[in-house]
Image (tube, rainbow, N blue to C red):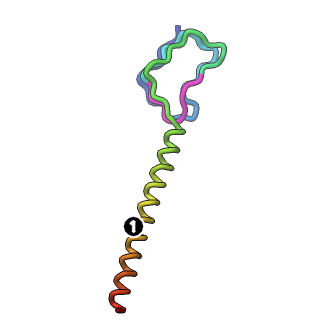
């Protein structure tokens, strides 16, 4: 039986990769860049309570925040331009 990998933070591009490795307990790890990979020759490995990155969610969140921020900026600029135009009309009358 191999030593368990537990309670670690991994920030490399590989995450946790098991190659022909059996009966490992991989638990409570926080993986920053990539998640876990187990090849077809592994057996009996236990993956429990690991935190893996969700790249799709992060991308969608960035797009959502950018869209909301851009919409807000456009809205504020539009309101300011309308108010300025109204003031100039009143002064010209």
Q: Which residue is mark 1?
A: 76
Asked if residue 8 is positioned above or below residue 26 in the image, the reply reads: below
From the top left corner, tell me how far across and down residue 2 is, in percent: 52, 11
From the top left corner, tell me how far across and down residue 46 is, in percent: 50, 14
Q: Mark 1 packing: few (<14 Cα in 10 Å), some, or many (20+)?
A: few
Specify the farthest residue to the top.
1
Specify the farthest residue to the bottom.
93
The region drawn magenta spans 29-37
Asked if residue 8 is positioned above or below residue 3 in the image, the reply reads: below
Would residue 23 be found to the left or right of residue 68 on screen?
right
Residue at the (37%, 86%) spot, across then down: 88
Asked if residue 80 is positioned above or below residue 1 in the image, the reply reads: below
Foreground residue among 16 and 48: 48
Q: Is 64 part of what is drawn in magenta?
A: no
Foreground residue among 59 and 17: 59
The quadrant in which residue 90 appears is bottom left
Residue at the (43%, 26%) spot, across then down: 8
Asked if residue 63 is positioned above or below residue 33 in the image, the reply reads: below
Foreground residue among 13 and 38: 38
Specify the farthest residue to the front.
93
The quadrant in which residue 79 appears is bottom left
Residue at the (55%, 9%) spot, across then down: 44
């Amino acid at each position: 039986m191999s030593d368990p990998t537990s309670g670690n933070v991994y920030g490399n591009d590989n995450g946790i990769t098991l190659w022909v490795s059996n009966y490992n307990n991989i638990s409570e790890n926080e993986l920053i860049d990539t998640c876990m990979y187990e090849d077809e020759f592994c057996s009996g490995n236990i993956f429990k309570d690991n935190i893996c990155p969700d790249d799709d969610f992060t991308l969608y969140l960035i797009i959502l925040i950018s869209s909301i921020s851009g919409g807000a900026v456009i809205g504020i600029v539009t309101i300011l331009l309308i108010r300025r135009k109204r003031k100039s009309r009143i002064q010209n009358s």
